[in-house]
Amino acid sequence: MNPLRKTIVTAFSLITFFLTGNAQNQLPTHQYFNKHNTYGFILHSDGWGVNFRKGYYGGGVRKIHGEFDLVSLKHPKEMKYFNPAYPDAKGYVFGKMNGLSVFRAGFGMQDVLYTKARRANGVEINYHFTGGFSCGLMKPVYLYIIYYTSSEAIIVEEKYDPTVHYPDNIFGRAPTTKGLSEIKFKPGIYLKSGMGFDYAAFSDEIRCLETGFVLDYYFSEVPVMAMINNKSLYITFYLNFQIGSRK
């Protein structure tokens, strides 16, 4: 693990662990609500995605929830290239064999650290810890490849093959829909830890900005790039913009 990321993860975990001790001293503010649903848009350090979370109030300041994420996940070595011989060439990532998306399904707990009643600006601060199943969805990358005949250049779509495709015969990336029927799955697990700041004006609404980190671990290496080392562990930092309601 990158030393800087390891330090940040450790510090964040210690801080949030310390803060959760204060949750015992907060007064319950959602006793009359039974459940809540939220829909989120995620921006993270290696991509973006969407989130759905359904929670139930367990009494006091603790909530139990289940969630689903669908996010894109880039390899840190990805760089976009263009073929300089063709002004209208399309961008592509040289060496990328598979595009990676991640579907997560998990359960977790959320504790309220500071209730809106105790905050002058009416912001609730909460902390959550979630874990579960992470499934990597690998879709092969197709490219436009240039072949030369005696009279012209012909461009065809082909699945990327690092043994025969080079920068001088790649015109660009083919449509994203190409290769959908060839998706392969990589099973794994994930852990997510974060803090949320709910600024909704009404108690039955949720308007929350959540930030934290996610660890996705796959049981074997995920072959995203050719000719370089691939990973089985991905660590990402995220922002999740959530809207929803309590009932």
Image (cartoon, rainbow, N blue to C red):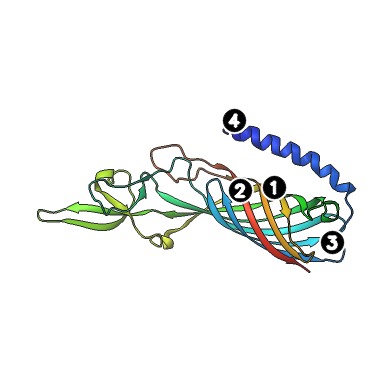
Circle nearer the viewer, 3 or 4:
3
The location of residue 27, given as percent across then percent down, is 89, 54
Pointer 4 residue: 3
- Sequence order check, earlier mark of 1 and 4: 4
**Marks 3 and 1 in Cβ contact (< 8 Å):** no
Q: Amino acid at mark 2?
A: Tyr
Kindly report the distance in space between the C-alpha atoms of the residues bearing marks 3 and 2.
Answer: 27 Å
Pointer 3 residue: 30
Kindly report the distance in space between the C-alpha atoms of the residues bearing marks 1 and 2.
Answer: 9 Å
Pointer 1 residue: 194
Query: Horizontally, is 140 left or right of 122 in the view?
Result: left
Circle nearer the viewer, 4 or 2:
2
x 63%, y 34%: residue: 6
Kindly report the distance in space between the C-alpha atoms of the residues bearing marks 3 and 1.
Answer: 21 Å
Mark 2 crowdedness (10 Å alpha carbons): few <14, some 14-19, many ≥20: some
Mark 4 crowdedness (10 Å alpha carbons): few <14, some 14-19, many ≥20: few
Q: Amino acid at mark 1?
A: Gly
Residue at the outermost bottom position: 247
x 63%, y 48%: residue: 190
- Sequence order check, earlier mark of 3 and 1: 3
For residue 238, the mark is 2
Q: Please tell me whether mark 3 sits on a helix, a strand or a loop.
A: loop
